[in-house]
Amino acid sequence: MEFSYLNDKDLLYYSRHILLPNIGIEGQQKLNSSEVTIFGLGGLGNLLSTYIASSGIKKINIVDFDTVEETNLQRQINFNSDDIGLSKIDVIENYLKNKFNDLVINKYFEKITTSSQVKKIIIDSDIVIDGTDNFIVRKIINEACYKNNKKLIIGAVEGYSGQLLSVISSKSACYECTYEDLVDNNSCSDTGVLAPLVGMISSMMAMECINIITGNKSSYDNKLVIINGLNLSVDFIKTKKNPKCMICS
Ligand SMILES: [Zn+2]
């Protein structure tokens, strides 16, 4: 993280964040100096990348290999019908740069298959955010973050269920510890997905990221949050490090 002073324009733009007791000028400077990597520009990545950029984080790496499809538009709210067929990273880059003109965006049009590939992307990141849509890729990102000491926030939405988990340090239960036996790999094309629930989880991921950067405080370390979109219940499940975890022990 390189330190950056806020100019007059920044002080005005971020004034409503600066007024918050846990952010202030110091916290806003930390946000403006941070680099964040976002994997996946589906429903989660759309809103998430917008809130991350609007919070003042100036360096954002975006990773995705997909193109925009008609069925995405219901929940991937930064896309419109003119974007169908275009690559998601190009559309999101244009969208964010139009809104936030001093943003530095690095684009990675890549399908993630190895931990070393992830390492190259995240090497300078303060926080890594995983909004991808399958367990195999999440496990690869989890492995790379653990090996390279990167704080990781993972979100997922399937059907009426939204989930959120952070892996902050070597003391945290990692994604592999939490989902060791999971082989199921449903996607939203099989199960459907409730659009506002995607917005809710992506907003929570963005808040978690802001709180970690400004206050060094995670709300979801060693804690899996499950939100049921049908009755709006929120459950917290305590997670524990698995002493036999193939990644973190
Ligand atoms: Zn583990």
Image (spheres, rainbow, N blue to C red):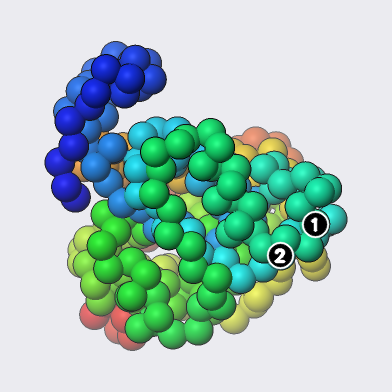
Which residue is located at x 70 percent, y 71 percent? 186
Identify the element where label 2 is drawn: loop
As rendered, which of 84 and 135 lies closer to the eye? 84
As rendered, which of 126 and 53 lies closer to the eye? 53
Crowding near the residue tagged with mark 1, few <14, some 14–19, many ≥20 C-alpha atoms within 10 Å? some
Q: Amino acid at mark 2?
A: Thr
Question: Residue 123 sits in which quadrant?
Answer: bottom left
Q: Is residue 58 above or below residue 241?
A: above
Quadrant location of the C terminus in the rendered image:
bottom left
Q: Is residue 136 above or below residue 30?
A: below
CB atoms of marks 2 and 1 within 8 Å: yes
Q: Which residue is mark 1?
A: 84
Crowding near the residue tagged with mark 2, few <14, some 14–19, many ≥20 C-alpha atoms within 10 Å? some
- The picture places residue 199, in percent across and down from the top left corner, at 62, 40
Q: Which residue is mark 2?
A: 67
Q: Marks 2 and 1, how far apart in space?
A: 7 Å
Question: Residue 31 sits in which quadrant?
Answer: top left
- The picture places residue 42, in percent across and down from the top left corner, at 64, 56
Which residue is located at x 48 percent, y 62 percent? 107
Q: Is residue 146 above or below residue 215?
A: below
